[in-house]
C-alpha cells in the first residue's frame, strides 16, 4: 500500500474513532433533533448562510465517512430550511458525500479486490460498463438498500465518477423529498420507521422498476429503428438459417435440428470450413509426418545406431489430403441431412433481417427465417507490403497445393500458424527462414515459453529472425528477395517461396453485411453482444467472423449460445461464457494454455503466485527421451485456486485438459495433488506441479511442533 493510501486510511480511521469515542452519534438522534429544533431554527434565523454552510458540511462529512445519522440530518433539513431549500441542500450535500465515499472506496480497495477476485469481477465489470447507470438508478430509487453500501460497492466497479454523481443525485431525489417533507412535521414523528410505511416502500420498489422498464423501452425503440426500413414477412419458412459450414455453423445447425427447429445450412465452398480443409486437420497431419522424420534423425537417442528414411514430399502432401477425406464424413452433407438439417451448397446473401437469398447451380431462391446465424469464418490476412503482388505467395489456405518441396522457404509471421508450418517444412527438408517483427515468437505467451520454442527451432537449423520488419519484396535477376529492417539497417533475405502467416481477417463482406449495415467492431469483425447478437437482435454471429478468439473449439462454444438464444431467446437468453478458454500451439514442444499467464496477470495488475515443475524430471518423459519443457501454474496468493496454466512439452494440449476441468469447476491444486495419476505417464506432471505448490505452503511452524511430539513419543 502506497503512502497516500496509508495517509487517507489513517485520516478516515481517526475521524470515525473520534465520532464514536466522543459519542457524537448521540446528537444525530430523533430525540436530540426534537429537543434542539428551536435553538437550531433561531441560529438559522440569525446566521442563514453560515447555517447552510455548516449543515451542508456536516451532511457531506457524515455521508462521506459512511457514518450513521444521514436520515436524521435529512429530517433536520426539512425542519430547519423547509421543503424547497431543504431538498436542494440535502440533494447536493448527500450526492457530494456519496461521491467522496465512492472515490475513497475506489482509491483504497479497488486494486486489492481486483487482484483477489479478478475472475468474478470480470463479468460484473462488463455489466457495469454496459448498464451501470441503470443498475445504480434502480438501487437509488429503492431505499430498502442502504445508500452507504451502494457508495462503497460502486467504488469497486469501473463506473465513471461523473456518471455515479448525476445518477445518484437524480436517483436519491425521490427519497430526499419524502424525508425532507417529513422533517417539516417533525413534532408528529415518533420514529424513523414511521416515515416509510409499507405502502410507501412498495411505491419506491415499483418506482425502482422504472429504469428497467426504461431500458427495455430503449431496446424496443432501437430495435424498431434498426428494423424500420424492412418489411417483416407474414410467415417464415425456417426457424433458423446458418451461413457457413465451419465449426460454428455446423454446431449451430446441429443444435437447431436436435430441438426440432427447421434449419437450413448454407455453404458456398466445402463442408467443414477452414478447420477441416485448410487448417486444423491438414496442419496436424503434416506435423505428424514431419515429427516422424524428426525421430528418425534422433535415432541414437533411442539406442538405434543408424536409421534412414526415403520419402516423397508429394506423397506426404497426398497423405494430408487422404486424412482430410477420412475426416470429411463427420462434417458431410449426408450426415447433417440425416440429423435433420437442410443443407444447401450455394452462395448466401442476406437481403433483409428475415430473408436470405441463396444462389445455386439450380437458380436463386429466398428463404424467410426468424433468425440467422452468421458463421462465415476468416481468411489469411495479406499485409500491404510493397512488391508483394510480384510474388506468388503461399498462405495457410494454399500451401496444401504444394507437391514440390521449396528449397528455401521464407515464413513471414511468428504466431501459432507460422511457427507450426515453419518447423514442419524444416523437418521435411526446406531451408526455412522465419521472420517476425516482434522481439520473439509466440508473443501471446510468456517469454520463457518463447525461449524454449526458439531454442528448439535454432537447434533444428531454422533461421529465426526476430525484430525484423518486412519492408519490400523485390525480384532481382530472377531471384526473390525480402528487404527487412533490423535495428535500423536494411537486411536482404533471398528465398524461393514465401508463406504469409501474419494473422487472419474476418469475412465480413459478400453476403449482405454492408447492405444491411450490420455493425462492425474495431477489430474488423462483426460486432456482437454478450449473447452473440449483432445490432439486429435476430441476426447472430459466431466463430472467426465474430471473434474475439480464432479457435475451432471457441467457434463451437459460441455456436451453442447463438443457436439457443436464436431459438429460445424470447424466453431466456444466455451470455456466452469465456471464463475458461484453452488453446494449444502444436509446435514441438507443444505449447498449451488456459487462463492467465504471467504477462497477462502483470498487465491486468492481478496478484499471483507461480508454481513450476520441470518435465525434464518426469520419469515417463525421461523414458520417452522427451525430457524437456515445464508446467507453470498461476494461483491466488496463499491459496490453491488456479488462475492460469501454461504447459510446454510433449502432449501439452492433452495434459492441459485436467486443468481446464479444474478451473471450470473450481477445483484447486490440493485436490489435483490428492488424485491418483497412473505411473508412468506424462499426466503425472500435473500432480507434481501441485506438489510444488504444496511444498511452498508447508506449515513449517506446525511441523516443528509435530517433530517435537514424535521426539517425545520416542523417549516416552
Image (tube, rainbow, N blue to C red):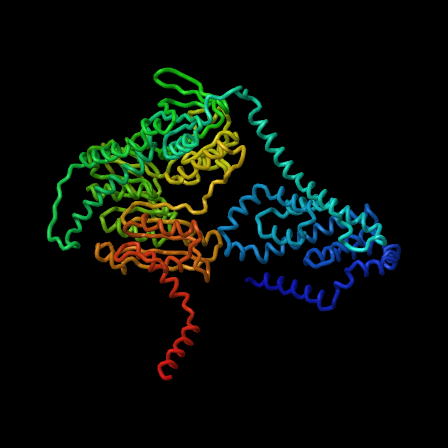
Q: Quadrant of residue 612?
A: bottom left
Q: Is residue 80 visible?
A: no
At x 46%, y 62%, the residue is 638
Residue 321, percent from left and from top:
24, 33
Quarter holding the N terminus is bottom right
Residue 41, percent from left and from top:
87, 56
Q: Residue furthest left?
A: 306
Residue 156, percent from left and from top:
58, 52
At x 39%, y 27%, the residue is 265
Residue 591, percent from left and from top:
33, 49
Quarter holding the C terminus is bottom left
In this rendering, the count of numbered labels is 0
Q: Residue furthest bottom?
A: 715
Q: Is residue 243 visible?
A: yes
Q: Quadrant of residue 388?
A: top left
Residue 223 located left or right of residue 546: right
Residue 446 located left or right of residue 527: left
Give the vertical position of 35 relative to 418 (above or below): below
Q: Quadrant of residue 258?
A: top left
Give the vertical position of 68 relative to 270 (above or below): below
Q: Front-most of 421 and 347?
A: 347
Q: Front-most of 259 and 101?
A: 259
Give the vertical position of 22 relative to 213 (above or below): below
Q: Front-most of 430 and 350?
A: 350
Give the vertical position of 156 relative to 137 (above or below): below
Residue 417 located left or right of residue 666: left
Q: Front-most of 328 and 79?
A: 328
Amino acid at each position: 500500500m502506497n503512502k497516500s493510501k496509508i495517509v487517507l486510511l489513517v485520516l478516515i480511521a481517526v475521524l470515525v474513532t473520534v465520532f464514536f469515542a466522543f459519542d457524537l452519534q448521540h446528537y444525530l438522534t430523533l430525540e436530540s433533533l426534537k429537543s434542539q429544533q428551536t435553538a437550531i431554527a433561531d441560529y438559522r434565523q440569525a446566521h442563514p448562510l453560515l447555517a447552510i454552510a455548516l449543515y451542508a458540511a456536516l451532511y457531506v462529512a457524515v455521508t462521506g465517512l459512511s457514518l450513521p445519522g444521514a436520515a436524521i440530518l435529512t429530517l433536520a433539513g426539512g425542519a430547519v430550511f423547509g421543503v424547497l431549500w431543504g431538498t436542494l441542500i440535502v440533494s447536493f450535500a448527500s450526492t457530494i458525500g456519496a461521491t467522496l465515499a465512492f472515490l475513497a472506496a475506489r482509491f483504497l480497495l479497488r486494486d486489492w479486490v481486483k487482484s483477489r477476485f479478478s475472475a468474478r469481477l470480470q463479468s460484473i465489470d462488463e455489466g457495469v460498463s454496459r448498464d451501470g447507470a441503470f443498475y445504480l438508478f434502480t438501487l437509488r430509487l429503492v431505499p430498502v438498500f442502504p445508500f452507504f453500501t451502494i457508495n462503497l460497492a460502486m467504488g469497486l466497479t469501473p463506473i465513471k465518477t461523473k456518471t455515479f454523481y448525476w445518477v445518484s443525485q437524480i436517483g436519491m431525489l425521490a427519497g430526499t423529498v419524502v424525508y425532507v417533507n417529513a422533517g417539516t412535521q417533525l413534532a408528529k414523528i415518533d420514529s424513523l420507521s414511521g416515515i416509510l410505511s409499507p405502502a410507501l416502500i412498495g411505491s419506491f420498489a415499483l418506482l425502482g422498476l422504472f429504469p428497467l422498464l426504461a431500458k427495455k423501452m430503449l431496446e424496443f425503440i432501437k430495435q424498431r429503428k434498426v428494423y424500420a426500413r424492412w418489411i417483416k414477412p407474414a410467415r417464415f419458412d425456417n426457424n433458423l438459417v446458418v451461413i457457413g459450414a465451419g465449426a460454428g455453423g455446423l454446431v449451430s445447425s446441429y443444435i437447431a435440428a436436435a430441438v426440432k427447429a427447421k434449419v437450413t445450412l448454407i455453404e458456398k465452398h466445402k463442408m467443414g470450413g477452414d478447420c477441416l480443409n485448410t487448417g486444423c486437420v491438414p496442419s496436424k497431419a503434416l506435423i505428424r509426418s514431419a515429427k516422424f522424420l524428426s525421430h528418425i534423425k534422433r535415432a541414437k537417442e533411442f539406442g538405434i545406431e543408424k536409421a534412414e528414411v526415403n520419402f516423397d514430399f508429394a506423397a506426404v502432401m497426398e497423405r494430408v489430403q487422404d486424412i482430410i477425406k477420412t475426416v470429411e464424413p463427420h462434417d458431410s452433407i449426408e450426415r447433417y441431412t440425416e440429423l435433420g438439417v437442410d443443407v444447401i451448397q450455394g452462395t448466401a446473401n442476406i437481403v433483409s433481417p428475415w430473408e436470405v437469398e441463396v444462389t445455386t447451380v439450380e437458380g436463386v431462391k429466398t428463404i424467410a427465417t426468424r433468425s440467422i446465424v452468421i458463421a462465415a469464418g476468416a481468411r489469411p490476412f495479406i499485409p500491404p507490403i510493397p512488391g508483394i503482388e510480384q510474388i506468388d505467395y503461399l498462405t495457410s489456405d494454399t500451401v496444401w497445393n504444394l507437391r514440390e518441396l521449396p528449397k528455401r522457404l521464407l515464413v513471414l509471421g511468428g504466431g501459432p500458424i507460422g511457427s507450426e508450418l515453419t518447423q514442419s517444412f524444416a523437418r521435411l527438408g526446406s531451408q526455412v527462414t522465419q521472420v517476425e517483427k516482434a522481439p520473439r515468437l509466440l508473443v501471446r505467451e510468456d517469454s520463457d515459453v518463447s525461449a524454449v520454442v526458439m531454442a528448439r527451432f535454432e537447434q533444428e537449423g531454422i533461421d529465426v529472425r526476430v525484430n525484423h520488419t518486412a519492408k519490400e519484396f523485390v525480384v532481382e535477376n530472377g531471384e526473390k528477395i525480402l528487404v527487412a529492417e533490423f535495428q535500423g539497417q536494411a537486411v536482404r533475405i533471398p528465398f524461393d517461396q514465401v508463406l504469409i502467416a501474419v494473422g487472419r481477417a474476418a469475412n465480413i463482406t459478400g453476403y449482405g453485411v454492408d447492405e444491411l449495415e450490420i455493425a462492425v467492431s474495431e477489430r474488423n469483425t462483426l460486432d456482437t453482444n454478450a449473447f452473440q447478437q449483432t445490432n439486429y437482435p435476430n441476426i447472430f454471429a459466431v466463430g472467426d467472423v465474430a471473434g474475439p478468439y480464432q479457435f475451432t473449439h471457441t467457434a463451437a462454444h459460441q455456436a451453442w449460445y447463438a443457436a439457443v438464444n436464436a431459438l429460445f431467446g424470447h424466453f431466456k437468453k444466455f451470455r456466452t461464457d469465456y471464463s475458461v478458454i484453452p488453446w494449444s500451439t502444436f509446435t514441438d514442444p507443444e505449447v498449451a494454455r488456459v487462463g492467465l499467464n504471467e504477462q497477462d496477470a502483470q498487465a491486468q495488475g492481478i496478484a499471483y503466485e507461480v508454481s513450476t515443475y520441470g518435465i525434464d524430471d518426469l520419469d515417463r518423459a525421461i523414458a520417452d527421451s522427451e525430457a524437456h519443457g515445464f508446467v507453470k501454474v498461476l494461483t491466488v496468493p496463499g491459496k490453491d485456486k488456479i488462475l492460469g496454466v501454461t504447459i510446454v512439452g510433449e502432449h501439452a494440449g492433452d495434459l492441459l485438459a485436467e486443468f481446464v476441468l479444474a478451473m471450470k469447476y473450481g477445483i484447486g491444486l490440493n485436490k489435483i495433488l490428492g488424485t491418483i495419476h497412473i505411473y508412468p505417464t506424462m499426466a503425472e506432471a500435473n500432480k507434481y506441479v501441485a506438489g510444488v505448490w504444496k511444498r511452498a505452503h508447508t506449515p513449517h511452524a506446525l511441523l516443528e511442533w509435530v517433530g517435537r511430539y514424535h521426539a517425545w513419543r520416542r523417549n516416552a
